[in-house]
Image (spheres, helix red, strand yellow):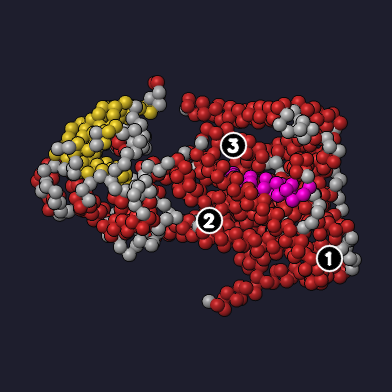
Amino acid sequence: MSILRSRQGYSALVLPVVLLLAWQVLAWRASTPLFPGPWQVAVSIWRLYPQIVGQIGYTLMRAAAGFFVAAIVMVPLGILLGRLKAVGSVLEPILDMLATLPPPAVVPIVMLFAGTGDAAKIAVIAYAAGIPLIMNTYEASKTLHPMATLVARSLRLRRLETMVFIDLPASLPMIATGVRLAVASALLVSVTAEMLLATNGIGVFLQRQQENFQIANGLAAIAFISMVGLIVNDLVQRLERRLLFWHYRSTETQNDR
Amino acid sequence: MGSFRLLEILAGFRAIISFLIIIVTWQSIASLGLVPEKYFPSILAIAAGFRDMMMSGELVSAELRTISRALIGVASASMLGIGLAVLGDLFPSFRRGFAPIAALVQPIPPAALVPMAVFMLGLGPKLYAFIVILVTVWPPYFNGVAALASVSDVQIRTGQMLGLSRWQILRQIKLPAAMPEIFAGIRYASSISLIAVVVAEMLAGHDGLGFLLIRKAFAIRIPEVYALMFVCAVNGLIMNTIVNGLRWKFAGWQSRMTGQAA
Amino acid sequence: MDVVLEARQLAKAYGVGTDALQVLGGISFAVSRGEFVSIVGPSGCGKTTLLFALAGLQKASTGTVTFNGRSVTAPPRGVAVVFQDYSRSLFPWKSNRDNVAFGMVRVEGLSSAQKRDKAQEMLEAVGLQGFEDKYPWQLSGGMQQRVAIARGLASQSELLLLDEPLAAVDAQTRADMQDLLLDLAVRFQQTCLLVTHDVEEAVYMADRVVVLTRRPTVVDHEVPINLGKRRDQITTREDPRFLAARHDVMMSIRSSRTAAPATAA
């Protein structure tokens, strides 16, 4: 078994290694600083990582702030809208419309109200993260099985208690999907907002490198962003598996039957 | 049947009602002076801004560029994504080798790609194709791989008993079964494709809606900025409509099935 | 005897005007303290609608329900419902003990430790000791329904409304659960109202069977079951009085079925 797994592990490395080699060969043949190979990028990472890590710190902090603002506002709102069917169905087309508006398009407006500082960036991130959160929460709370409500009523729960003790946990699996999208979107928009409202952060670092024609340094920053994104997404998924074990294990056992 | 038609009419009204609510709230905020009028223009001013941009022709040309970039990008990314998913289904070793690449490339924001890509690809269609494809290929790919892998054994064995080849099973059983999920991926891809195009246009600073948005913002032509945001949102609706239409054609069996069950 | 639950001229129509579907057409009956009453009727006669109206989960169009002399407009204290769909009525994010303890969410004057102890006691009463820390989805269907019954008892109920609670469990488990329910009803002094489509079950469990007609549903007649409180899966079911009662109920259901136009599934 373990032999099989390690052989699969090696075979998984073949394709990435081949691609890296091909890229290196192409870079050698182009032999221009505007088309660096993986080796130059690695050198850049080695030279610049303290600076890159520092800048990514700003980016991550703002992404986290924006995400939490969005979660605190949108999850309760989504549950409430799912419960108040009349209000929800009137607001639904508005949500649909907002969902189709690309977050960067709100940057110019946010700039008017909040300037170009941290508040503006966090507002754009919160908008971007808020849309998948409220859409998924609303959808989950709207489509809850009526049985949950019946049980809540026969146990004589108050409306607020039903929302907290039943609607919220029952909606969590779908909210988790929203959280995954929102986290990815928060990171993405955090970098974007920095590039448009330049002050600090990895997005600004990237632009500086471009202005100085330091392509290898820029690619090094991109490599870092992708690693950070990978780690954050993985953490979110682990956390989700841990907290929602009852959801995954219960659907598994139901599929077994 | 009668009550069903009534529901349909009500659903149509609902969209109109919520649209009216937006307009009324917007207009009352603007006219009550809660927010400086300069930042929050009235609906009429926004409409006038829209008209001006239409008259000058700048809106139409920007819009055509943006939506065609997004459409072409998503179409190619979807084909590529489905192709890669099929490849991954036929050759598990390809899927395993591709996994780390996908995991690393997927989290890269389109904005981060723009400065570097401009150097290598210029400001032309190649730039947008590269960025949109690199950003939107993943949802159809991941959904496709997952859906192809979860086609029920019974259906596949039925195909085997009918004497179908591996390729025929893929073509006639697995792909149709996987289509609804692939289309869910394409739908998500189409929404991020618009984000990617607008971001790229904002940063590349050459043409398109994103560029126009930035230019109007710096010129402090606020009604025009709101009008452009509205156009961006409408683009999202257009993309959704196109994807839903295709979904009905290629994966309609599912909607019809669930529609009948309901 | 003192009446716990009473329905008077209970009627329910869905929709309005010419489209209206009259489901319940004026149902009246009463349940006395400590009694076990079964309600049976032909398919589609609105048994669940009736039970929901009795539980205060759904308003009737006309007529009244009283529980301990008070009119029922919302789920009253002291009434517990055991639903057919146990997999949905239990919460998958709560352990079995927490699910049962959740039955006491509206019970005042108990600390959470006391609720925990009470939940434990009820799980033991339904024969689930050792499964307290497991989750509902780790149990078989019959065991899940036991958790739901324990939750009902834990909510300090005096009236158990059973909505086809055993329809989805296998035949052998069902026999065990029937005896368990009879035993619990006596031990915890519960008045029980069982809604079922299974005539044998209705007769086996009950002190009295209320037979319903087809839509618009009214009470066809009531069949007293004079078999005493002690029942046995083999001997009771062979008892001539059991067979006579079964015959009576089945005949009236068949006659209302043959009179009924075919309805779509």
Q: In which image quadrant can residue C146 be found? A: bottom left
Q: Which residues are magenta?
A: A116-136
Q: Position of residue B180 (x, y in %)?
A: 58, 48
Residue type (three-letter) at the residue carrying disc 1: Ala
Can the viewer see residue B174? Answer: yes
In the displayed structure image, the side of residue A244 where residue A190 appears, left or right: right
Q: Is residue B133 visible?
A: no
Residue that appears at 66% across and 29% down:
B25
- Callout 3: residue from which chain? A
Tell me, for residue A62, which label it has, or none. Answer: none
Which residue is pictured at 53% across the width and 43% down the height?
A: A79
Side of C207 where B88 appears, left or right: right
- Three-letter residue code for mark 3: Glu
User: Which quadrant is the C terminus of chain A positioned in?
Assistant: bottom left
Q: Are marks 3 and 2 in contact (CB under 8 Å)?
A: no
Query: Which mark is first along the chain, 3 or 1?
Result: 3
